Structures are given as structure tokens and as C-alpha cells.
Amino acid sequence: MSGSPSPDALVVGAGIVGAACAWELARAGVRVSVLEAGLPGGGATAAGMGHVVVLDDNEPEFRLAKLSHELWSALAPELPAGAEFTRPGTLWVAADGEELDAAARRAAAYDSRGVAAELLDARQLAEAEPELRDGLAGGLLVRDDAVVYPPCVVPWLLDGARRAGAQVDAGRRVAAIEGRAVRCADGGRREAAWVVLATGAWAPELVPGLPVRRRKGHLVVTDRYPGFVRHQLVELGYLKSAHGTGSESVAFNVQPRPSGQLLVGSSRQLGVDDDAIDHRLLSRMLRRALEYLPGLARRHALRAWTGFRAATPDGQPLIGPWPGHDGLLLATGHEGLGITTAFGTAWLVADMVLGRPSPLPREPYLPARLAGSAP
Amino acid sequence: MSAIATVDCDVLVVGAGPAGLAAAGAAARAGAGVVVLDDNAGPGGQIWRGAGAGVAAPDARAAAPWLDALEHPRVQPLAGARLFAQPAPGLALAETPAGPLAVRHVRAVLCPGARELFLPFPGWTLPGVAGAGGLSALVKSGTPVAGQRVVVAGSGPLLFAVARELKRHGARVLLIAEQAPRGRVARFAAGLWRWPAKLADALAHRAALAGVPYRTGSWPVEALGGEALAAVRVSDGRRVREIPCDRLACGFGLVPNAEPARLFGCAIAAGGAVATGARQETSVPGVFAAGEAAGIAGLEAALAEGAIAGLAAAGAGEIPAGPRRARERARAFGAAIARAFALRDDLRALARPETVVCRCEDVTRGALADQPGWRAAKLHTRCGMGPCQGRVCGPAAEFLFGWGAESVRPPAFPVRLESLAAAGEVPPGGTEGP
């Protein structure tokens, strides 16, 4: 035997981001161990909508989402049926002329960067989505945006990682990160050249001081109403809600599932740690949805639930080393884009572990940019 | 915005079956203003279904004095109203045909009853196969069975009541198949003298069902048929008999409807019933539970517990000895039933890998076999995620795989989005801390 041994990595957290990191690393020849406290894919991964969306609010967000969307698309044919990967497209709904102007600017920007997007006028919007209320100005249709059922993607990724030699420990809680090692709640200790922290909104529990906050969201799923809406419908004001720093916001965001069910969102709430349904905010969220889709009022809601996004102060994820912690790579802070950007994140993490160059600039995501900022 | 209809009361009673009726009557007589919510069209619950509607139900006479509670001037019954959320303590949201309704209350008595346990076996989804209690309810509300060949199978005394109801409506009951072994059933029957009313019931059933074969140690293993049920295969552990029939009514005992209590945050005891104390109080202050939801023990227990809970919720200091003694006697009967009719392990093996367990989402036993628990099963297979919210497959999966029940979140039942939206727009009432 000669040469240096291949690096090894401990991935802490098996949500979509951790599972994608484990999958990418294992296939690249890294010896990987995954440690997940609960059910793989059972946290924010299961709570979200599973919208694979190329957001374009700013350049870094766009680049990571675009790369990830390409990776999702390449994988789509291999995904299991339960992953329900479909491409309904995203239809951004403009309520008035001002929003339609913004939509036109975004259409041009998408177009210039190779993303199929088209502007719809009021009539075209009504034809595309007859259940939308009258009087809307138009819309922006991003055709290739996809939806997926992430809880069934995670086990598939972990199986793939296992086949590439990874070890997956579900139900093992990591109590502390100690340099290039982790200590488990059951007392066990594991060492590795790299520790990849992918515990989403819970990352600060293992690395105190990380600038990640829990941003609570609510979702509602309906009974089956096939054809009620055809695209993922999002109000153009959504970006304001998603990127705003206010303590609370709601936005109209409805997704048709392949089952015919509808997912109805969305809400954002900072500074709340309990996962109970907040009826006051749920009401606001549903009223917003009913403003756009009045016919939804008499349709039946089956369930409501909540989840926690990992929010950062500047809205960009934390991907890379954290100053003062040798061997630690962060993969968290994805806010509402964790499903979309899981694969781009995994790619960057693998590049860092293997010392490879990356296909896009890493700087906007490097956690060091926020070192010293309050969480 | 808050155009939502709102009613105020001292005591909210959820459920208008025997326990709820007893609770409402006791609370009203003790001076409390009472609102009774029930999601059925009329009061009476499962056991007295239709008794208040002038239907010539056999139990109408027994039910009448209890139904009188709803005539009390301090009682406001609301039929067709289904509890779906508790946005804040002292505030319950129900969906009614007229829209959402908010009930502001000081205390609550939860009496949502029980439902039948239905265990999956090959062919159970064929038309013609039904829950025993479900078929009984259908027959009471007009579904014709005259001249049809029916097999009643499962476990417990309820099978007799169902068979009797079917026979009364002209069905030919070919067989009652009881899964419990002969020895246990015989011991149970020999001990019935301790509950004379139950003994009288049993004798009346026996007389009414003269000529209907009753086989202990027998259980259905497969329903056969193409488009609809043609026959059922019944096993006694040694051999399997095939019985041609038009209907198969199955019930494997009762499971408490604990959803309203879970919604209110009440602790659940082992076995799935709401945990209650001497005054029928739950773990949540001001919230009481009575009847089958607080432990399967039958009609007399429901009436006694309802009366105790109603008094306690109305603020009565002392609970009279009468209902307390009645409760103890009735609970002893419930315990005897649980012992005698405990389900045999053979029933866990009936469903094959391709047998559907969750009908709403078409999930087979094979798809569930590898899941470590309920949450994983829900996430990865959607078992229990359909419109019935796991009410049918939930207890079955818990029996098959030993999984613990999941928590309940609003809406506890499928409700219109406008109703769910209204839930956050009512100011909580609750003038007095419980």
C-alpha cells in the first residue's frame, strides 16, 4: 500500500442536504459515516413543499439554484417513483401593473441566462389557471421548475451512499463536535478528517454562535382535486416575504401534487421555537391563498403542520469551513431553498473535501463572511 | 373578518352518545349552561343511533330518558357539528352545515365514543365486506339486507347485537364467527351473573338469534369474489371452510376515539384511551372525558362516567356514590370483556404482502413491513395520510406492527379551508380559569 489514505467524513444530519452530501462524497470515494438523530428526511425536508425553483433574486442565489436544478434534472430519470419528480413549472402571479412590470424584468433576466420563462398577460393567466380570481394583471411562467417529494428522495440517496460504502446510523444523536470528531449522545466517539454539519435550523446546538435562526413555516394539504391548479402558483410578492427580515409574513404559494392534492402555503415566523400550529398566522396564510384562489374556500384541508427553515442574516446558505473549527464544514442555512439547492451544496462540499475546483464561485456561501455577526 | 358564528357556554360536551347525554343532563341540572356538539345528524351515538328520530329502534325506550337531557332549557344541542380545532384553551372550533362555529367554554367534557377495529385480510376491500357496526348503522338508516346471506365475524358481544339487527331486517345470518377460544368465552358467559342486565341482554340475543350458528375459535381468513363478495373463508385453526355469502360484517372489538382529547392536549393511557381520574378529569385542567373514549367498558360505564364528568364540569363538589359504584361495576365488566375477547396472534398474519392496509392511499402490508414506525410509514408510504386520517388503518397498523399512535394536529377532521381559516379569527373567551 502506498499513497495517502482517502479522506473520510462524518455527515451529521440526514435531511436532504446531509443525504445529498453523503451521496456525493461516497460516490467520489470518500469514506462516509452519516449520523442522524431522528428519522432521515424527517425534519424540514419533510415539512417543506419540495419545490425545485430557480430563484433569481440575486446572483449567488441564482447560480446555486441553477446548478442544483440541472443536477436534479440529470437525476430525475433515476429517482424512485415515490420521489414524484414532475415539472409543473412555477407561475409567478402578478396582482397589478407594478408586479407585472417586475415580472417582465425577471422574464428578460431569466431569458438572458438560459432559463425558459415567458410573460403571460391577464387573459393568458386566466387560461393557464382558471381558478385564479379575476382582475389579476398577468404572470411569469418558469417552465422547467419542478416539484418533488423529498422524504422519498432521502432514503434513495442514503441507499446510493451505502452502495458506495457509506455507513448510515439513523437514530444516533450527536451530542458534541470535538475538533475532527463527534461525540454521540450514547457516549460513542467517531473521528474523521472532516465533519460536515447539515442539521439545518438546529446547527447552532452543535456549534454555538452560528448565525442560523429557526424560521417557522406552516403548510396545509388538501384532499385530492386533480386539475384545480396546474402550476406551482406563487405571488410575486413572495420574494419579499422570503427574503424579508421581518418577524412574520405570509405569501400565496400553492402547489399541485401528482396525487391531485394541493399544498397551500406559506408563512414565515422568526423567534418562535415551538412547533404547534399558530391559528392566527395560519388564518392569515389561508386568507391570502383564498384571495387568489377563491374556489379553495370550500375545498377540504386534510392536515396542517409546521417546520423550521434555517435562516441566515443575509439569506445565503452557509457552505464551507467555520473559522476556529478545523475540519468542520457547514452545510446549512438554506432557508426555504434546501430542497432546490441540496445537490449544488453537496457538490461544493465534495469539492472542498477533495480539494477540487468548483463550477461556481464559493465566496458568497462561505460562512466566514458572517463570522462575528450575531445569530 | 370574524363573521364566524360564536356560542358561549359553561360546559362544552363533545359527543351526544350515552356518555355525552349523561354529561349534558348532569351538568345542566347542576346549573351549567351546556352546548353539545355531535357530528351525526341526530343524537344517540352509535348504540342509540336513530333513537331520537322516532325510528322504532329496539333501544328507543332505554334511550328516551337520556335523550331528554337535550330538552333541558340550559342545553343547546348542535347536530352535524364536528370539532376540528382548539385554537386556544376555552375555545373550540366546529364545522357545521352552516359554516364554522366557535364554542367558547369554561370546561369541556369529551365523549367521542369508540370505533370498530377492522383488521385487514385478503379481499377485505371487496364490495359486500363491511365493518360490523358500520353495516348495522347502514341497515338502521335504510340499506336493505332482506333475504341476503350474511356472515358476521370478528370478536366480542357486539357481534350478537349486529347479527340481531341484521336478522331483524330480514337478513339470513349464516354464521357468527368469534375469534376468541371456546374456553375463554365460556368462562366469560359463566361470570355474567355478576351483571344481571348484561346477562339479560345475552339471553335476549340468544333467543333472538335462535338457529344462527355461533362458532368460537373461528375467524375470517379471506374474502373471495370478483367484482363483489361471493364467499368468505373461515378458519378454526385446523381447517378452513368456504361459506358462500352476500355480505360479510367484521368487527374485532372497539378502539377509543382519542382524537378530540389529543387535540385538547390530554394525556393518553396505555391501550389508547384518554387517561382520566376519579372525577373523569384528564391531564388538562378543565377538560374531562367519559365513555368509551376513556376506556372501552360499554353503555353502563358510559352513562355513569358521563354523569360524573357532567357534575364535575359543572363544579359540583361531591360526586354521589351511585354513579361511582355503577362506574366500578361497569368497568369490571369492560375488563372481563377485554380478557375474554383478547385478539389472537393468528389475526396478525392474515394480511398478505399484497393486501391493502390503508385504503385511502392504497398502501399494502408489504410496503409497511420495513417501516420502523408510524412516522416513517406516513412519510415514506403515505399510510394513514388520506381523507380518513388513518382512522381505519391506524388501529389496524398499530395491531399488526405494534406502532404507537401519532399526535393529532388541527384539523382533527378534514374541514373546508374557510373553516380552518376562521379558526384563528375568534378571540378566545373563557371568562373563568378552570
Image (cartoon, grey):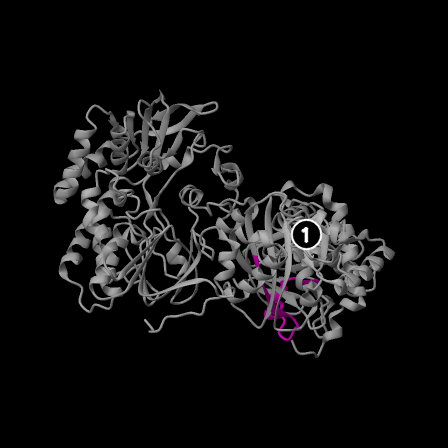
Residue found at x 71% / y 61%: A236
* Res. B328 in view: yes
Residue found at x 70% / y 64%: A237
Is A213 one of the magenta-colored residues? yes
In the picture, measured across the screen, residue B159 lies left or right of residue A221, that is: left
- At label 1, counting other C-alpha atoms closer than 10 Å, the crowd grade (few under 14, some 14-19, many 20 or more) is many
- Split into 4 quadrants, where in the image is the C terminus of chain B? bottom left
Is residue B314 shown above or below A8? below
Total residue callouts: 1
Circle 1 SS class: strand
Q: Quadrant of residue A344?
A: bottom right
Q: Amino acid at mark 1?
A: Gln
Question: Which residues are the magenta region?
Answer: A193-219
Q: Chain of mark 1?
A: A
In the picture, measured across the screen, residue B142 lies left or right of residue A171, that is: left
Residue A197, x across and y down, in percent: 66, 64
Circle 1 residue:
A232
Q: Between A246 and A118, which is closer to the camera in this rendering?
A: A118
Task: Determine the residue located farthest toward the right in the rendered image.
Answer: A112
In the picture, measured across the screen, residue B236 lies left or right of residue A142, that is: left
Residue B116, x across and y down, in percent: 35, 42
Residue B106, x across and y down, in percent: 33, 68
In the picture, measured across the screen, residue A69 lies left or right of residue B431, that is: right
* Res. B332 in view: no
Is B322 one of the magenta-colored residues? no
Q: Between B358 and B99, which is closer to the camera in this rendering?
A: B99
Residue found at x 79% / y 59%: A351
Task: Determine the residue located farthest toward the front in the rendered image.
Answer: A135
Q: Quadrant of residue B305?
A: bottom left
Residue B271, x across and y down, in percent: 34, 50
Is residue B2 shown above or below B99? below
